[in-house]
Image: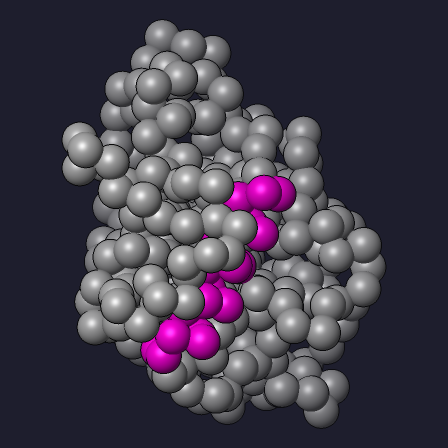
Amino acid sequence: MAFTVETNRRLLASKHLPPCDGPKLHAFKHRNASIKWLELLSTPLDARSGCQGFVFKVEIKSKTYALKVFFPPSTDRPILGPIRGRLVTDEDLAFHTDPFYAECRAYGRIQKAYGGQLPKKPYVADCYGFLALNDKDEKHLSDQGIDLWDGISSDDEYRVTAEGSPARALVKQYVKRDTVFNGKTMERIRKGIHFMNSKGILIRDVRSDNYQGDLLVDLGSAWTKPHCILDNAPQHLVAEWKETDRVMFDDMVREEGLRHEARALIVGVDVSYATVASGRRRWAS
């Protein structure tokens, strides 16, 4: 599949994305409604920064949401050494690793796990679907000095064929409460990681910046099974990658100065951290 302007328009007009094996997210039910732009919530950065896009506080049909508008993907990817020589297409990589599609797949899996009923105490901020920005909304961003292509080279293969494609966005729950990283919060976050991993989702970006209250608000780095890299990489690497979320949680606890308080809470529950003699942290039951 060539990702041209027309192809991207057709994809974003779909009822569900991405069009590949595995979980999918539905379109936002009011995707053609007017958007009232209220506030930029994220730090203004470009595509070179590692940031995946911009997050805005918006109003759609009198309801307040967080709208994540994504940078376009780039074909300037790092060499994927672990799967070099294996059968992994550019289409697989796009639908499995591009942050927009990565979130669609992760939220699709989460919503399936919920069985259509949001739990009373979820671990992840809710997502209400995807949409494409219209020309009016893209002009609003431009008037604010936001160029979603900034940082992507003019001769980038994707940009050459796809510049002019609609901007992609996810409509999410707006969470306004601040995060207090006490032991109770960290225990909820730890349980959320266990829940996600048990559903075949590696978050791969467990950081304090990605939480509001005790809710995870960003899944743009997630790998959700089936996944082209996990399915084709050597098993010893896959085993190491599966430890990523737990190691990052441990690092976050340390950074927040709560190691002892969180560890005291974790002792005695069904899953805990253990440091083995080699110094590698493992998920221990």
Could you tell me which residue is drawn at 67 percent across and 83 percent down? 60
Residue 196 visible? The answer is yes
Residue 161 x, y percent position in the rendering: 44, 38
Q: On the rendered structure, is 165 left or right of 14? A: left
User: Which span is picked out in magenta?
Assistant: 181-199
Do we see residue 69 in this rendering?
no
Between 254 and 238, the one nearer to me in the picture: 254
Given the current orientation, which residue lies at the most extreme top position? 85
- The question of residue 251 being in magenta is answered with no
> In the rendered picture of this protein, how many numbered marks are placed on residues?
0
Q: Where does the image place residue 202, in percent across and percent down from the top left?
A: 47, 43
Relative height, residue 1 to residue 169 (above, below):
above
Residue 156 figure quarter: top left
Q: Position of residue 40 (x, y in %)?
A: 40, 83
Q: As displayed, is residue 45 above or below residue 230?
A: below
Q: Main secondary structure of the magenta part?
A: helix
